[in-house]
Amino acid sequence: IPFEESYYRSLLHNELGGELDELLSWHEEEIEKTRNSVFEIMGKIKVSDPMPKTMGEINAILLKYAGPADSPEEMFRRGHDYLKRTRAACREYVWLPDEWCDLRGVPEQLKVSYPWGGAGGGDPKSRNPIKGEIFFNEVNFKAVTDGWMKMLTVHEAYPGHHVQYVRGAVDLTPETVKMGAKYTPILEGLAHRSEPLFEFVFEEDPFYPLFVAYRRHHTAVRIKADLMLRYFGKPIGEAVD
């Protein structure tokens, strides 16, 4: 059931900092652009498989060559290693005080709503060092591919949400940046932008840039799905297709 347009418009503007007319003007173009980027990058990777023609075949390539760990324990071992790498790289670009970001399992209440992982927030009592955490979904570890592991340590930690939390704790940031609807595009926009910017951390992996592009396409598709359901009133099945 679609939202009433004025309510949907208000929800986007007042709660999420987005503009309905802006989304409507570019969401189809963004899907085409991000899809083309995926196949352009795929064309530069040498594999014995036939050139993929669909996003499903791209996903199969990522699963085959950069798939999930064999166990939750191996997933966390890789995650801790990737977290060390992104932290070291981030400190070359961003000033950080004495801080630490831990990697944990998914909180019980988020097992279904966060299928891959997320930022767990920070400990407001910790000041020396300032401590934060991210999480991987070990219950769904077969879906947490190597690309997701690497990307999560960037987007959720360095230089993403954990760094935002740390700098928010120590910087004299204006209240207009710390709160309000317009905070959301800044918060998520910077974290998403960090994904392609920090590809160099994993430069030995030719499949990681492919995953980053795939992830960008994924976010564009989610925007269209939301518009289909909430603005255009399309059935769930059509949005899924």
Image: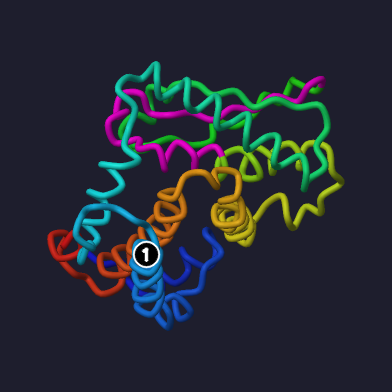
Instruction: From the top left corner, tell me how far across and down residue 108 is, in percent.
Output: 38, 22
Name the kind of residue labelled 1 in the image.
Val
In the image, 104 versus 62, the foreground residue is 62
Instruction: From the top left corner, tell me how far across and down residue 111 is, in percent.
Output: 34, 29
Which quadrant, please, contains the N terminus?
bottom left
- The answer to whether residue 133 is magenta is yes
Tell me: residue 238, above or below residue 109.
below
What range of the chain is rendered magenta?
A: 128-153
Q: How is the image coloured?
A: rainbow
Q: Tell me which residue sits at (58%, 56%) in the image.
A: 184
The residue furthest right is 172
Q: Is residue 132 left or right of residue 127?
A: left
Tell me: residue 118, above or below residue 173.
above
Instruction: From the top left corner, tell me how far across and down residue 233 is, in percent.
Output: 22, 70
Tag 1 residue = 38
Instruction: From the top left corner, tell me how far across and down residue 32 is, in percent.
Output: 34, 76
Q: Is residue 21 left or right of residue 161?
A: left
Q: Tell me which residue sits at (42%, 59%) in the image.
A: 213
Q: Determine the secondary structure under disc 1.
A: helix
In the picture, residue 3 is in which quadrant? bottom left
Which quadrant, please, contains the C terminus?
bottom left
Q: Is residue 91 left or right of residue 38?
A: right
Circle 1 Cα neighbour tier, 10 Å, few/some/many (<14 / 14–19 / ≥20): many
- The answer to whether residue 32 is magenta is no
The residue furthest top is 73
In the picture, residue 146 is in which quadrant? top left
